[in-house]
Structure formats: C-alpha cells, structure tokens
C-alpha cells in the first residue's frame, strides 16, 4: 500500500507546484497590464511604448481581466470606452457571453476614433457583410465553438475538432499561418479557453500549454507570435489578456 500512497503524495505536490506557477504567471501578466495604463486617456496602449490605443479588442479585454484584481482600473477603462462611444464590437464579446448576435461571423473594419496629444485611438467594428471562408482560421473556429456551447453543442464540438486537425506540432497551421509564415500565440490561448468551455481535456493540451507559457516575457506580457519555437514580435495587451483568460480557467479548475 505504501507505493500508491507515495505516488499520490508526489502527484499532489506536483499539482500544487504547477498551480502556484500558474498563479504567479497570472499575477505577473496582470502587472504587465497595469503598468501600461495611461492615466490621461484612462486606456492601455497596444504595447509598451506604443501611441496606439485600441478600444476593441485591447481595452475591452483588459477591463474584464482586471475586474477582480484591479477593480478601480477596470472601471476607469470601461468609463473611457463609454466616453468614446464604443461599448461593443460584435465578436470578441463571445468570450464573456456578451455578444448579442455572434454568428454568422461578419466582416470587420478597423477605424480611427480620435487623436489626442499625438496618440491615436482605434477600434474594430462589425459590418453587415457575411464573412466567407471563416472556417479556414483557427481563432474563428474556436470562437464559434464557444458561441455554440449552449445553443448547438454538437456544432461547437465539430468546430473545435476542426481546429485540432490544424495542430502541426508547433501551432495551429491555418490560413493565416500559411500566409504569414508565423504562428499566433493567442490562438493557443483560445484553444485552451474553448476546451474549458466545452468541458473537455483536449488533444495536445500539454504541448499547447507549454508553448503558451514559453511566450511570456520578462515584463510579464505575452509575445504575439513565434516561428521555429522562437518568439517573434513584442508582448501586447490583446495576446496577454487572452492568455490570462485561459490561465485563469486552468487555475480555477485546479482549485
């Protein structure tokens, strides 16, 4: 009887260690976000040193991700979204069940909202045009899966499984990857978030999580892309927020 008990004790110790690591990474990521906050605009720039501020998706996501740990900061960001007249976009809200008409996906446009003291404020807007070939993209398949969890669970799982097929051992080899030659970090995070919403243990979970964790930089943010296992680009708000959302789900499940 001693060997199984020792094995169980070892497993419990490893689980606790892993959970602590995830929590520390979450806290480091939140610190990255809070240090970017621009008190004049009450918004976060796209990345450190950037003069571009995105209402959607960046600041909408940041307001959600900081709501528990930094509620005052979250409220200030939400206030700025309202001040500039943009409290919804139409797609990213799927992650928080706040999208009124998430599907079918429609084409989106990026537009300037304002220019203040040399800083540009932009956002993403939905159009009325139906988006074609959206299922060639891992992120849209995963968002569709999340959107369909309650209303169409079979379709939700089918869209998730289409993403699984795109995994090539490094990342999700979708149309965007084939065009650019690089892998997007945030798609790793969306994969884990979608699996959590489907309440499944997905294929390649360990590989996806390990690669995602490897993209966190010294400041606590997550780097946007990678190629040949090497980071490409800089840590930005959107990628960091989507990663934190996935890690928070993992941390909660392990409690």
Image: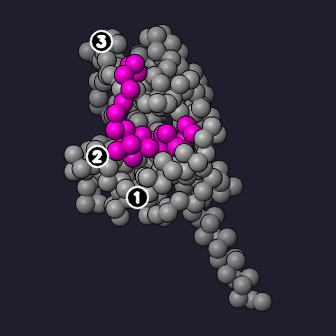
Residue denoted by label 2:
175
Give the foreground label among 1 and 3: 1
Magenta span: predominant SS is helix
Q: Residue 46: x percent and y percent?
A: 34, 30
Give the residue at the far right of this rendering: 1
Q: Is residue 12 above or below residue 105?
A: below
Q: Residue 240: x percent and y percent?
A: 43, 41
Residue denoted by label 3:
115
Q: Does the rendering let one see residue 213?
A: no
Q: How many marks?
A: 3
Res 199 label: none
Residue at 53% across / 15% down in the picture?
Answer: 79
Residue at 34% across / 38% down in the picture?
Answer: 133
Region rendered in magenta: 126-148
Q: Residue 166: x percent and y percent?
A: 37, 56
Asked which secondary structure carries label 3, the reply is: strand
Q: Is residue 138 magenta?
A: yes
């Amino acid at each position: 009887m001693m060997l199984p008990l020792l094995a169980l004790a070892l497993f419990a110790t490893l689980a606790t260690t892993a959970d602590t690591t995830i929590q520390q990474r979450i806290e480091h990521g939140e610190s990255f976000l809070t240090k970017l906050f621009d008190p004049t605009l009450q918004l976060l720039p796209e990345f450190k040193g950037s003069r571009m501020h995105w209402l959607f998706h960046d600041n909408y996501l940041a307001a959600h991700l900081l709501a528990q740990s930094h509620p005052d900061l979250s409220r200030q960001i939400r206030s700025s979204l309202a001040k500039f007249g943009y409290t919804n976009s139409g797609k990213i809200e799927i992650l928080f069940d706040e999208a009124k008409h998430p599907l079918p996906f429609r084409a989106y446009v990026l537009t300037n909202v304002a220019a203040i003291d040399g800083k540009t404020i932009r956002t993403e807007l939905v159009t009325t045009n139906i988006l074609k070939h959206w299922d060639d993209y891992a992120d849209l398949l995963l968002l569709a899966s999340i959107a369909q969890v309650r209303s169409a669970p079979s379709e939700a799982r089918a869209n998730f499984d289409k993403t699984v097929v795109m995994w090539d051992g490094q990342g999700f080899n979708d149309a965007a990857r084939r065009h650019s030659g690089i892998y997007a970090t945030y798609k790793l995070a969306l994969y884990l978030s979608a699996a959590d919403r489907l309440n499944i243990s997905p294929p390649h979970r360990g590989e996806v999580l390990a690669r995602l964790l490897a993209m966190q930089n010294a400041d606590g943010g997550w780097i946007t892309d990678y190629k040949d296992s090497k980071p490409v680009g800089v840590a930005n708000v959107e990628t960091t927020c989507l990663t934190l959302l996935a890690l928070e789900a993992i941390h909660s499940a392990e409690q």
